[in-house]
Image (cartoon, rainbow, N blue to C red):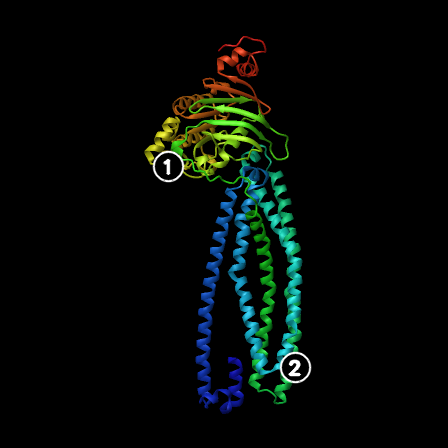
Amino acid sequence: MLIGLAVDVVVQQETAWLSRFGFTAVPQQLAVLAVLSFLIWSAESLFEYLYGLLWRNLAQTVQHELRLEAYDHLQKLEMAFFEAGSSGRLMAVLNDDINQLERFLDHGANEILQLLTTVLAVGGAMVVLSPGVAGVSFIPIPVILWGSLRFQRRLAPRYAAVREQAGDLASRLSNNLGGMLTIKSYTAETWELARLEQQSQAYRQANRRAIRLSAAFVPLIRYAILFAFIAILVIGGLQAWQGQIATGSYAFLVFITQRLLWPLTTLGRTLDDYQRAMASTNRVLDLLDTPIAIPSGDRPLPVGQVRGELRFESVHFAYPGRSPLLHHFNLDIPAGSTIGIVGSTGSGKSTLVKLLLRLYEIQGGWIRLDGIPIQELRLDDLRRAIGLVSQEVFLFHGTVAENIAYGSFEAPRAAIERAAQLAEAAGFIETLPQGYDTVVGERGQRLSGGQRQRIALARAILKNPPVLILDEATAAVDNETEAAIQRSLDLITAARTTLVIAHRLSTVRHADRIVVMEQGRIVESGRHEQLIAADGAYANLWRVQAGLRSGETLSL
């Protein structure tokens, strides 16, 4: 409009359109145009800042809330979901896929609103000035919209394939970084680099297929705009030449036609960003739509009131796609007792722990805590009442004190140190460079296996649960660490229900009762001396670990 008015001033001079408002002199009219230009450009700059501020902050808010919602839902899924999937793919969903949505909201949504506003405002102004020219300028719009929708439908599966390959690539990288020790020890660097190259190449090819289509959109749109612009240039020029419209109006129409049609070229980039964002958003929404297979009960269970009596009644369970592991399984564990569970690999020992913590759901029967079916209890109360020390200790990147206090986040320093002493971990902790404030590294890689195990035991002691489970807690430690853990157990198992799952029979030798499992069934049960005297499955296991031949006399 300013350009059209400027042309009108130069051509019409004292009779220009601005003269209607009392500005008859050309210098006055140019001064008015200068002031208007300053005000309009200043307002444009201000509003560009404001809408950038609004949309970018909105994008950050949506990204933040969607990531938290997805992660919160992820934490509620059963362990089978994580064991069947890949942590790298989940990382890609929670990070890169959600970032794709942020990139679209940063500018794409605003560009759509700007485009709609431009078409309505500019189109209305053109209709008022010259309906014929406006009709010509509108001709390419349906073509552009039809082409945009057609490209969108063809781009959608290609960007879905891109995101799928991105997940696979993230999975490969995550897996390799976690297994770097194995890669180095087996000198498999070249092999892994070749596998990563193959995965990265697949990702690049998926992107190329999408780029080949998306890159063709804007050039095709340019041609549709070109023909409309040429038509307006000629038709409007003829009308101005014949005196049907003013020269300034003609200049206005030429420039406003570009303002109307040229932004449509950005539609290609906007739709491209939209399809990328939708491919990623669908992956996030698929994660949010994953049903929670193990819902929490609604019955509260104050930890201070838990006695620790456990009962498995006719429990039936099978892992997905496998034959039943437990069938009519029964086991009573009195409150305050220490029960040892032994057996060969795959006999179902660790499965009992997973079922008790409701990491998996039983398919039949009941598991009761203090007579209450665990399905009725609130999940956080149930798991708060149980302390688990497993063979595969996971330490978070942080200090020794932070890892001991994990789950008991408000514990005072004195309680943390007391738990470390009971776990016989205080000795080595005090020799570390910063003591309890020493950073253990990712997964605790700066500590030995025995040190990590004792920190995990201190964590469980600090939690002070009514039920304590040691799942192969001494399987991967040296004799000194096993002896230290055993001394700790003598102190911490008093007045609490303790389940000790072990391959090393020396760990359960002094348990109140030892249960021997084979193929999901209890084949023997009793104290150590009774089972040795019975000369059955337990006695055979004891012979193997003692290095005796079959039939040799066993010593109690």
Q: Residue at x 63, y 84 (%)?
A: 237
Seen from the viewer's position, the closer of residues 294 and 220 is: 294
154 relative to 424, above or below: below
461 relative to 538, above or below: below
Q: Mark 2 and mark 1: span between their CA atoms?
A: 79 Å
Q: Mark 2 — residue?
A: 234
Q: Residues within 10 Å of mark 2 (few under 14, many from 20)?
A: few
Which amino acid is tagged 1? Answer: Asp
246 relative to 313, above or below: below
Corner quadrant of residue 128: bottom right
Q: Residue at x 55, y 72 (%)?
A: 118
Which amino acid is tagged 2? Answer: Val
* Residue 185, position as x, y percentages in the image: 56, 32
Mark 1 or mark 2, which is nearer the start of the sequence?
A: 2
Mark 2 lies on a secondary structure that is: helix
Q: Mark 1 — residue?
A: 437
* Residue 192, position as x, y percentages in the image: 61, 39
513 relative to 57, above or below: above
Q: Residue at x 51, y 35 (%)?
A: 358
* Residue 413, position as x, y percentages in the image: 33, 35
* Residue 378, position as x, y percentages in the image: 46, 38
Mark 1 lies on a secondary structure that is: helix
